[in-house]
Amino acid sequence: MKANATDLPPSPPGPVSAPAEAVTALYRAHALGLIRLAVVMLGDRPAAEDVVQEAFCGLYRRWHSLSDSGKALSYVRSSVINGCRTVLRRRRRLSGGPAGDRPGGTAGEPPGESAESAALISEEHRQVLTAIRRLPARQREVLVLRFYLDLDEAEIAASMRISRGTVKSTTSRALAALGRLLGEPS
Amino acid sequence: MNTIEERIRAATRAAADTVPPDSVPPLELPEGGPARFRRRHARSSGTARGAWLAPAAAATAMIVIAVSVVAVSRTTRTTAAAPEPTAAGPGSLTAGPPASSYVASGQVPPYYVAITSHGNPNLNPSYAVVQETVSGKTLATITPSVPGGTIVAVTAAADDRSFVLDEQHWVQPESSANQSFQARTFYLVRLSATGRPGPPEKLDMSVPAGAMMTGFALSPDGGRLAIAVEPNDVKNDLNLQEVRLYTLASGTEDTWSADGTIGAGPDDARSLSWTADGRTLAFDWTVAGPGVSPPSGGDLLAASRTAVTLVNQPAPSPSVSAEPLFPAISPVASPERAQPTCQQDSIITPDGSVIVCAAVADTNQQESTPASGGVSLRRGAVTAFYEYSAVAGTLLRALGHWSFGNVGALAVGVLWSNPSGTVLIAVIPTAGDGQVGIISGNQFTPLKARSASVSPDSGTW
């Protein structure tokens, strides 16, 4: 089921000679889906919006060197994933440890998560999200791309620049690790 | 449907739904328009979260350069570093001598053991088959020792006669239990001169339920078994990885442990490799744990890759120690638009002189189809089997540096090496799931062995 198809429709055709219009059109079509993707990764709405803004600005700056506009969505999605990785790395560096070690925070709960967002997520979902965010970056990313965006192996491989075999093995490892974190029966 | 998958979908959907459709902020593009050579972009944001925007933007720019390898045209890459002699562009694949000549001259083992199943391996238990390297003919079938069992992995000694099989209780697909965490027992099987297996001999060691085995390798002399395990210690140390060394004759065990990961996943029979003298066990080691940041840049695998040797001093030894073989494999400088990067599970050659990694990059191109007015994706790939000095970490040579115009999966893997790394058995991409064959220089000889979608599932020589 492609539940997020409405969030991430195919790229609209756009002339390369009109970068501002093309990037803006792409943003209108995909910003919601990409912000939601970043929120899932980060649990932090302001940070998610900034990551997406930066990704589209990066696309805009490099528009002239883009070999074809059809790759724009793939490009910007990879940028969002990398941007999320950077935010998480910086958080971890600031806290000196994994998510659960942050001063004033509990495991997997990002410091910027709003009270509104927290209230909207059930305890069951919070537990799963916390466990996902405790996984290593690559495992977390394949799970979100696979089970949130419903991307297939080839699409995940392209977004993360890894082989399909690595996607498969990383997914397997991530599911196993997540099962242990959640106390799933083995 | 797997319960945990449903839980992931529901939780991520719930998190996503906290962003209402009508709450997307407007896009703020930088003034002055796009530029070809600008590397940095500073937003003129005065918001509270602007405090961390500058380093985030800088880091993102660094990462985007790597991403641009895929998305940016060739003209932006004209300043790439001059290539090393061994990093020239890909050549054409040429047909090698017949497999029978490799086997007849003793360059390649005559048999291998593969894991297979009746039908979809995700839905059916697996068993082992002994097959001829040249013909792929099945010489013998080894079924699980008990009803309800499944054989999930196999490792071989250097004599091409001794194999250890990893057996588990089979978990039905509709069960919520996880196959990867079932208890494991190990059986030693010896082949006769004609490739016929003797009776399986149950070994003393095992991996208990709850732990995940991510690698195992029988020593070349068949006397020791190395097992990489993520123990069931999630509450105390989420990142703990152990390498256990068992001496089969005495049953003694040495253990090395640290925070990090080994192997591509459960049952990976490629993640550990021995030198012929049995003194060095090598594995790719990705460090993890508190305070350890993921590597930066787009080349995650290569940047995080550290080959480590686990040295077992002459027995009896009170403990084993692990030391980095060399700090990290550097990405290979190349003028190619798509630069192959090392995938998981490098191996050390039996003479201990070379680390071999299988590398791949995609060269996807969109093609216009005027008849329909749309575009289609043409998936291509570039492979290389990089060989690094195990002493210095420098690139020695690249075998199998080929370009493929149309492939299905980005399938690469190195399955076996001769003593010095000049002849490999490896997987290369095809229009399907890949092809197993013998690589010598830029020559390739296809074998009948099945290429599994995950290379650790392919045959073991």
Image: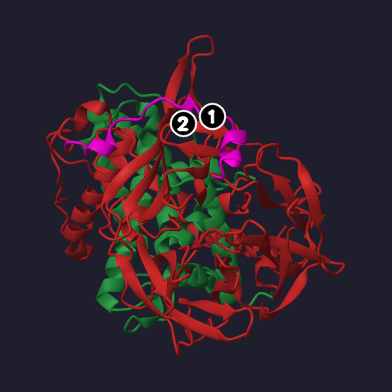
Chain colours: A green, B red
- Dot 1 or dot 2: first in sequence order is 1
Q: Which residue is mark 1?
A: B97
Q: Position of residue A186 (x, y in %)?
A: 69, 74
Task: Say which of marks 1 and 2 sits in front.
Answer: 1
**Residue B292 in sight from this viewpoint:** yes
Q: Which residues are drawn in magenta?
A: B82-106
Q: Which residue is mark 2?
A: B443
Q: Nearer the viewer, residue B374 or B383?
A: B383
Residue A155 vs residue B134: left or right? Answer: left
Q: Secondary structure at mark 1?
A: loop
**Residue B26 in sight from this viewpoint:** no
B135 is within the stretch colored magenta: no
Q: Amino acid at mark 1?
A: Pro
Do the residues under discs 1 and 2 have CB atoms within 8 angstroms?
yes
- Res A59 quadrant in image: top left
Q: Nearer the viewer, residue B97 or B310?
A: B97
Q: Amino acid at mark 2?
A: Gln
